[in-house]
Image: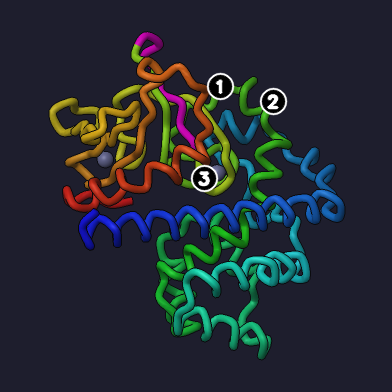
């Protein structure tokens, strides 16, 4: 194996180890949250009405985690992130947290706000890169949002959500699966693991449906995975072609194990 291949292999192994530890931590955190958060309060949300109006179900008004709950999530996540991705930004965030100069709940709620200025404003306020805060925000909110997704699973299935963003947290999908016979795609939210159906060929970022500007990039290993990229907005989504695989897909596992596809997409000029 050449040095470059060895280095690529090591990067992939480290990436998978990091996410394996992260997933274990998130499962433990979800077990903690399910025991203490009054999820029955979510029954107060008229899910059918919200979904029919195209509104995602969780917003800052029904984000049930209190400050101490989000701090618990952060305390669990911090050692794992520090172990694999130590950085000056992380040290600064920890320092702000220790000195009680940052409100982590506000940061977690930013994941469901979808105001383009939210992370920019937070970044300026805390002197941290907005993309770093966005990632931390997702990690802080994800265990709660995944439990919300389970809570609303039946309501989402019954109300035929057909939008390009997640019906629970409002984020854009990062992965999907397709079976051309059904002329539909199943999309998956990496923040809360919600799945929903959407049109087969429409870009789930800018809603472009011109077939000439949707590119399909196939990996060299001829696996059942591919990239659907949009030349209108330059976003991409990873797709599992269900017709090419007999195994049941697990979006979380497939999303992580297809990390090399992200590298290919970025090398081709696309981004998330
Ligand atoms: Zn979501
Ligand atoms: Zn697009």
Dot 2 falls on a residue whose secondary structure is helix
Q: Indicate which label's residue lies in the foreground, 1 or 2.
A: 2
Neighbor class of circle 2 (other Cα within 10 Å; few <14, some 14-19, many 20+) is: few
Q: Earlier in the sequence, mark 1 or mark 3?
A: 1
Q: Residue at x 51, y 40 (%)?
A: 253
Q: Residue at x 64, y 76 (%)?
A: 103
C-alpha gap between disc 1 and disc 2: 10 Å
Query: Residue at the left extreme?
Result: 212
Does residue 167 appear to the left or right of 258 in the view shown? Answer: right
**Residue 12: image x %, image y %?**
38, 54
Does residue 9 appear to the left or right of 72 in the view shown? Answer: left
C-alpha gap between disc 2 and disc 3: 18 Å
**Residue 229: image x %, image y %?**
24, 38
For ligand 1, tell me if the residue under mark 3 lies within 8 Å.
Answer: yes
Dot 3 falls on a residue whose secondary structure is loop
Q: Which residue is mark 1?
A: 160
Does residue 253 appear to the left or right of 213 in the view shown? Answer: right
Neighbor class of circle 1 (other Cα within 10 Å; few <14, some 14-19, many 20+) is: some
Residue 99 versus residue 70 in the image, above or below = below
Give the label on residue 170, or none.
3
User: Which stretch did the figure color magenta?
Assistant: 181-188
Q: Residue at x 47, y 71 (%)?
A: 85
Q: Which residue is mark 2?
A: 154
For ligand 1, tell me if the residue under mark 1 lies within 8 Å.
Answer: no
Q: Earlier in the sequence, mark 2 or mark 3?
A: 2
Residue 127 versus residue 155 in the image, above or below = below
């Amino acid at each position: 194996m050449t040095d470059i291949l060895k280095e690529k292999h090591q990067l992939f192994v480290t990436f998978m180890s990091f996410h394996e530890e992260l997933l274990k931590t998130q499962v433990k955190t979800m077990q903690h949250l399910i025991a203490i958060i009054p999820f029955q309060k979510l029954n107060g949300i008229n899910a059918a009405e919200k979904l029919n109006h195209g509104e995602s179900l969780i917003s800052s008004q029904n984000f049930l985690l209190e400050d101490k709950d989000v701090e618990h999530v952060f305390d669990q996540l911090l050692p794992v992130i520090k172990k694999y991705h130590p950085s000056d930004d992380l040290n600064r965030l920890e320092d702000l947290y220790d000195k009680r100069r940052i409100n982590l709940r506000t940061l977690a709620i930013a994941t469901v706000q979808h105001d383009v200025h939210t992370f920019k404003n937070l970044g300026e306020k805390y002197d941290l890169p907005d993309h770093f805060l966005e990632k931390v925000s997702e990690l802080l909110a994800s265990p709660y949002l995944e439990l919300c997704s389970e809570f609303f699973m039946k309501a989402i299935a019954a109300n035929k959500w057909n939008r390009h963003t997640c019906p629970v947290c409002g984020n854009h999908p990062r992965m999907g699966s397709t079976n051309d016979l059904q002329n539909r795609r199943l999309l998956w939210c990496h923040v809360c693991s919600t799945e929903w159906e959407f049109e087969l060929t429409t870009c789930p970022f800018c809603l472009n449906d011109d077939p000439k500007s949707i590119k399909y990039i196939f990996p060299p290993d001829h696996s059942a995975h591919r990239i659907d990229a949009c030349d209108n907005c330059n976003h991409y989504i990873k797709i599992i072609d269900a017709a090419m695989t007999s195994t049941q897909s697990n979006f979380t596992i497939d999303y992580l194990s297809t990390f090399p596809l992200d590298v290919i997409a970025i090398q081709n000029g696309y981004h998330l």
